[in-house]
Amino acid sequence: MKLENEITVKITCSYDELTRIMKEHGFEVINDLELLDTYYIKNEVNINEYTNSELLSNYLIIRVPSNNNPQITYKYKRFNDDGSIKEQGKVNCDVQDEKQATSLLEQIGYKKLIIIKNHIKFFKKDDVLFVAAYVNDEYLCLEYSGKNEKNIEEVIETFKTKYGFIPHDENNYFINKAMIEIDKIRNNNLKTL
């Protein structure tokens, strides 16, 4: 499993504005696609009995990009007490058919948790890659993975010093799309009680 030093920030401008800013700083859009992520957890898990960090420490995703075959992705995350990501990694497995992948996960005891629809743009300059995602037509976030940094603190410092021109929420470098969507489910469940 490949471990990653990745941060995700919430962008405070529009997608068009972000694209313009990135291009002004020499980045080019190398890919633009739609990505549908369906998250799965074990059948016996009741989301009301676990924290978001516990739910997202070990899960599967069926990932369907608009430009390629689907994948099953296993994601592993370990969190600090404050909810920030301490360690994370993933393994991808290409599949030929989304319906067969769904059937496989259901047969081995997984159930659907959430669905996240992303409009993704990849921005690249030299060996630096940013992945922007417009999530469920609601908010924009940007992922940055460190290349030479030894730990996540160095990744954050590199982002702040080299890429501070990108308009973002400076209070959180670990936006988690899945946690946001799980919170929505929890809030909807509370409203129906």
Image (cartoon, rainbow, N blue to C red):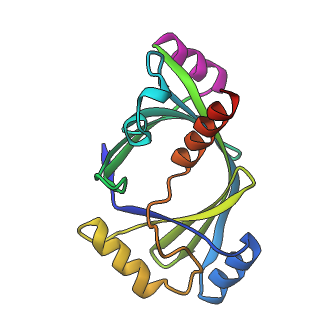
Q: Residue furthest front?
A: 193
Q: Quick check: 93 above or below 153?
A: above
Where residue 160 sits, quadrant-wise, is bottom left
Vertical comparison of 139 with 156: above or below: above
81 sits left or right of 173 in the view: left
Q: Position of residue 6 (x, y in %)?
A: 40, 61
Provide residue 52's location: percent of width, then percent of height. 44, 40
Which secondary structure class fits the magenta region best?
helix
Q: Residue furthest left?
A: 150
Q: Residue at x 73, y 79 (%)?
A: 17
Q: Is residue 63 visible?
A: no
Question: Of 12 and 143, which appears nearest the observer?
Answer: 12
**Which residue, as the protein is rendered here, is positioned at the far top?**
107
The answer to if 105 sits in the magenta stretch is yes
Residue located at (69% from left, 47% from top): 67
- Left or right of 24 on screen, residue 131: left
Between 63 and 7, the one lying in front of the other is: 7
Which residue appears at 56% of the width and 75% of the height? Answer: 168
Magenta segment range?
96-108
Residue 74 visible in rendering:
yes
Quarter residue 156 falls in: bottom left
**Quadrant including the C terminus:** top right
Please count the marks in the image.
Answer: 0
Q: Nearer the viewer, residue 107 or 124?
A: 107
Residue 155's spot in the image, x, y percent? 34, 72
- 81 inside magenta stretch: no
Quarter of the figure that contains the N terminus = top left
Whether residue 80 is situated above or below residue 173 in the rendered picture: above
Looking at the image, residue 127 sits to the left or right of residue 150; the answer is: right
Residue in front for this viewpoint, 94 or 38 = 38
List x then y, in percent, for residue 41.
47, 26
